[in-house]
Image (tube, helix red, strand yellow):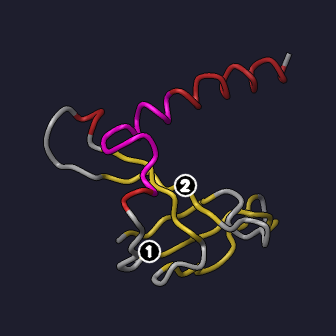
Amino acid sequence: NGHKWWISGAIRPECKLFILMGKSSFSGPLHKQQSMILVPRDAPGVQIVRPLAVFGHEHDHAEIIFDNVRVPLTNMILGEGRGFEIAQGRLGPGRIHHCMRSI
């Protein structure tokens, strides 16, 4: 269960699947307490509340509520506790790309 804001691309009709990073454990090392899981947009309990405006323009960000959403364990990416690892693997190259674009 959760309430998330600023989910990029969620308003676009072609977006059929969310990659959700959430807390999956409350013990162990902090960097191993999050997991990433694939959540179908049409799963029972997924409610897109509204689009969110950026600088006054609604584009593709959304506010979403996840209420008792259930997905198969096979929807977990790389296994439990690997969400932070996945995020860091993607954020690093993304940051470099944005820096290169600004030059």
Quadrant housing residue 12: bottom right
Query: Percent x, y for residue 52?
Result: 68, 69
Which numbered circle lies on residue 19? 2
The residue at which mark 1 appears reads as 66
Q: Residue furthest front?
A: 74
Disc 2 on helix, strand or loop?
Answer: strand
Sequence-first tag of 1 and 2:
2
Left or right of 62 on screen, residue 78: left
Name the spot of residue 14 as percent of width and height, x first. Answer: 79, 67
**Distance between the alpha carbons at the discs numbered 1 and 2:** 13 Å
Contact between marks 1 and 2 (CB within 8 A): the answer is no
Give the residue at the far left of this rendering: 27
From what the image shows, is residue 18 above or below residue 49? above
Tell me where the magenta segment starts and ends, as one range: 75-88
How crowded pointer 2 is (Cα within 10 Å; few <14, some 14-19, many 20+) is rated as some
- Nearer the observer: mark 1 or 2; the answer is 2
Q: Is residue 74 left or right of residue 103?
A: left
Which quadrant would the C terminus be assigned to in this image?
A: top right
Q: Quadrant of residue 74?
A: bottom left
Bin the neighbour count of mark 1 within 10 Å (Cα to Cα): few under 14, some 14-19, many 20 and up: some
In reply to whether residue 2 is colored magenta, the answer given is no
| Residue type of the residue flagged with mark 2 | Ile
SS category of the residue bearing label 1? strand
Vertical comparison of 47 with 71: above or below: below
Q: In the rendered image of this protein, does residue 26 appear above or below residue 88? A: below
- Quarter assignment of residue 51: bottom right
Image location of residue 37, percent across then percent down = 45, 55
| The one of 74 and 66 positioned closer to us in this rendering | 74
**In the image, what residue occupies the spot 67% across and 28% down?**
94
Q: Residue at x 54, y 81 (%)?
A: 47
**Observer-nearest of 74 and 89:** 74
Q: Residue at x 37, y 37 (%)?
A: 82
